[in-house]
Amino acid sequence: MINTFNVTLPSGATWTPTFVAALNEEKCIGCGRCFKVCPRGVLELVGLNEDGERIRVDLDDDDDEEYEKKVMTIAHQELCIGCTACSRICPKKCYSHAAALV
Ligand code: SF4
Ligand code: SF4
């Protein structure tokens, strides 16, 4: 039988984490808000150049000339704890989340 992965909180309530499943890069404006609130280092901002290639973005030394657009990507999905902080702060509703099946 397939069940949804649940956690019992100290209060006794049941919580179903919904893990990050997808990020719509078409909608993303690269604002970085989700990156700032993610407690697990799941996300990474990348630049897309005119050929659609991904370029590393240095947040401290931002050289906009190398890329056309910045987008957030899910770099380490396995680290996600399903808190949904990223999608709650995203102004463009880029995220999809899903419960894990066990
Ligand atoms: S759900 Fe939480 S841990 Fe997972 S990517 Fe979003 S902010 Fe990070
Ligand atoms: S908060 Fe939304 S729009 Fe902003 S970088 Fe993250 S995914 Fe993109």
Image (tube, rainbow, N blue to C red):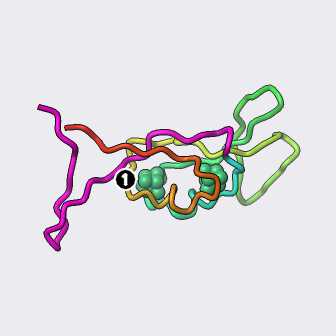
Disc 1 is placed on an element classified as loop
Q: Which residue is pictured at 43% across the width and 57% down the height?
A: 84
Q: Position of residue 51 (x, y in %)?
A: 80, 26
Q: Looking at the image, which residue is at 63% across and 58% down?
A: 91
Quadrant assignment for ligand 1? bottom left
**Residue type, mark 1 in image:** Gly
Left or right placement of residue 82 versus residue 43 in this view: left
Q: Viewed as shown, does residue 98 lie left or right of 1?
A: right
- Front residue of 77/26: it is 26
Q: Is residue 55 left or right of residue 39?
A: right
Q: Position of residue 26 (x, y in %)?
A: 68, 38
**Image quadrant in which you'd find residue 100:** top left
Residue 19 among magenta residues: yes
Q: Decide which of 25, 68 is in the foreground and name it.
A: 25
Q: Which residue appears farthest toward the top when viewing the image?
A: 51
- Residue 51 sits above or below residue 35 on the image: above
Query: Residue visible at 48% across and 49% down?
Result: 42
- Pointer 1 residue Cβ closer than 8 Å to ligand 1: yes
Residue 40: percent from left, percent from top = 43, 56
Is 57 positioned to the left or the right of 49 in the image? left
Q: Assign the C terminus to one quadrant of the image.
A: top left
What residue span does the magenta drawing correspond to? 1-27
x%, y% of residue 50? Answer: 83, 30
The verdict on residue 86 being magenta is no
Name the residue at the bottom extreme: 11
Does residue 49 sit above or below 14 in this rendering? Answer: above
CA neighbours of label 1 inside 10 A, class few (<14), some (14 to 19), many (20+): some
Label 1 sits on residue: 82
